[in-house]
């Protein structure tokens, strides 16, 4: 089984939303049994729940439930064990490469992996509308990145 790891700062907003959104996309493509999706934060407080706004936005907009999400601190083991690591900002990517330089072939900024550029801004403390905008931005990047992700991980859509 292949693995994708999303990384942000606290693992309560962006990476937790990305994790749920990618799982949903993979399920629609018949690839959910082939890819383990997880998330972590470079400064996570372990066991912190997803932010209420992230839970609300995904529930209302996508019918996805992340209410049981618990933040995970990024570790060298998580980095080493992942096949593909997608970060929300350049600073997250730089941090990983500083701590685990041998991961350079599998660590990418989410926007760049999707053929775009720029960080996914942190919505914490900026209201429900910003969470909605960030979730839509992340989903857009994931949809654009999906063909590259399938290729990078050596998968075939819907194939057993």
Image: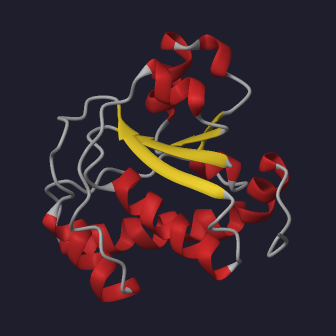
Height in image: 25 above or below 40? Answer: below
In this rendered view, identify the residue nearer to me: 14 or 72. Answer: 72
- Image coords of residue 27 (percent x, y): 60, 76
Q: Report the side of 124 relative to 101 (left or right).
A: left
Tell me, yes or no, if residue 80 can be seen here: yes
Please say whether residue 117 is visible from this viewpoint.
no
Please name the residue shown 25% across and 44% down the image. 71
**How has the structure been colored for display?**
secondary structure
Depth check: give the residue in front, 78 or 137.
78
Residue appearing at x 51%, y 33% in the figure: 90
Left of 155 or right of it: where is 3?
left
Q: Position of residue 69 (x, y in %)?
A: 26, 57
Using residue 137 as the reference point, say whether residue 15 is left or right of it: left
Q: Residue at 38% of width from left, 65% of height from top?
A: 134
> Where residue 32 sits in the image (x, y, percent)?
62, 68
Which of 76 and 159 lies nearest the eye of the viewer? 159
- Which picture quadrant has residue 28? bottom right
Please tell me whether residue 42 is drawn above or below residue 69 in the rendered image.
Answer: above
| The quarter of the displayed image where residue 86 is located | top right
- Exactly how many numbered labels are in the figure? 0
Vertical position of residue 18 compared to residue 109: above or below: below
Quadrant including the C terminus? bottom right
Looking at this view, name the residue that lies furthest to the front.
Answer: 160
Residue at (46%, 49%) from the top-left corner? 38
Q: Position of residue 117 (x, y in %)?
A: 62, 48
| In the displayed structure image, the side of residue 23 where residue 14 appears, left or right | left
């Amino acid at each position: 089984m292949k693995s994708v790891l999303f990384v942000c700062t606290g693992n309560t907003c962006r990476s937790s939303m990305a994790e749920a959104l990618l799982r949903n996309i993979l399920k629609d493509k018949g690839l959910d049994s082939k890819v383990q999706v997880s998330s972590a934060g470079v400064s996570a407080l372990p066991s912190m729940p997803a932010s209420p706004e992230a839970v609300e936005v995904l529930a209302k907009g996508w019918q996805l439930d992340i209410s049981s999400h618990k933040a995970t601190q990024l570790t060298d083991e998580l980095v080493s064990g992942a096949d593909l690591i997608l970060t929300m900002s350049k600073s997250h990517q730089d941090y990983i490469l500083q701590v685990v330089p041998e991961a350079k072939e599998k660590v990418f900024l989410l926007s760049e992996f999707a053929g775009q550029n720029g960080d996914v801004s942190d919505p914490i403390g900026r209201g429900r509308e910003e969470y909605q905008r960030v979730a839509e931005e992340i989903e857009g990047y994931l949809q654009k990145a999906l063909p590259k992700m399938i290729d990078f991980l050596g998968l075939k859509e819907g194939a057993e």
